[in-house]
Amino acid sequence: MNEKKIIQIASNTNYFGLKGILPLKAKVKNKVCGDEIEIETNKHLTEIRFETQSCIFTQASAAILSNNINIIREYEVTKVLQIIQKKLEGEKAELPFKIKELDFLTHKDHKTRKECIALPLYAVIKAIDD
């Protein structure tokens, strides 16, 4: 595991901090470790903001999601989540887009942190479904 790379990804805080200006909100908790993420977005997923009380894997995943929401929103978020889960289990699964940081984070070496990595996507799904 390359901890320095994960920290570098997580340190991108362009979308960190809730502003209360986006209509859809969700807060989810990882039942395995207790990590929490709160997100706000709009129904078209053109904007997203987040705050976490979590490990570096959840923070990195949230940063990747936020920085690439314009790419990810073109695909059904639930399908993207399913592909990520398969990749983390070591199954042969390819995302329909190329995001270098996401490929790194979803490598099978990080499968013990799959719930942390998936948490931001669960929050988005919850926000748009509520």
Image (cartoon, helix red, strand yellow):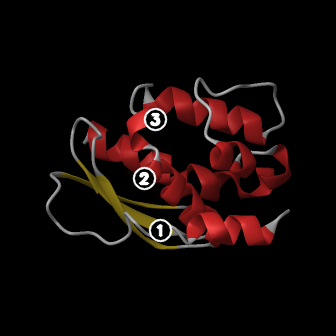
- State the residue position of label 3: 72
Q: Percent from the top left, x then y, of residue 20?
A: 17, 66
Q: Earlier in the sequence, mark 2 or mark 3?
A: 2
Query: Could you tell me how far apart the alpha carbons at marks 1 and 3 are, in whole angstroms?
Result: 22 Å
Would residue 31 be visible to someone looking at this image? no
Locate residue 61, reporting x and y percent.
57, 56
Nearer the camera: disc 1 or disc 3: 3
Residue 66 - label? 2
Q: Position of residue 39 (x, y in %)?
A: 34, 59
**Few, some or many residues within 10 Å of mark 1 (<14, 14–19, 20+):** many
Kindly indicate whether the residue at mark 3 contacts the one at mark 2 (C-beta within 8 angstroms): no
The Cα–Cα distance between marks 1 and 2, rounded to whole angstroms, is 16 Å
- Above or below residue 108? Residue 8 is below
Nearer to us in this view, 29 or 39: 39
Q: Is residue 106 left or right of residue 44?
A: right
Above-or-below relation of 22 to 4: above
Quarter of the image where one finds residue 51: bottom left
Q: Residue at x 75, y 42 (%)?
A: 88
Dot 3 surroundings within 10 Å: few (below 14), some, or many (20 or more)?
some
* Front-lying residue, 84 or 97: 97
Q: Element under label 1? A: strand
Locate residue 47 relative to residue 108 in the image: left or right.
left
Q: Earlier in the sequence, mark 1 or mark 2?
A: 1
Please name the residue that numbered disc 1 is placed on.
36
Which callout, 1 or 3, points at the residue further toward the start of the chain?
Answer: 1
What is the three-letter code of the residue carrying label 2?
Answer: Ser
Residue at image position (29%, 40%) is 45
Q: Secondary structure at mark 2?
A: helix
Q: Residue at x 24, y 35 (%)?
A: 44
Mark count: 3
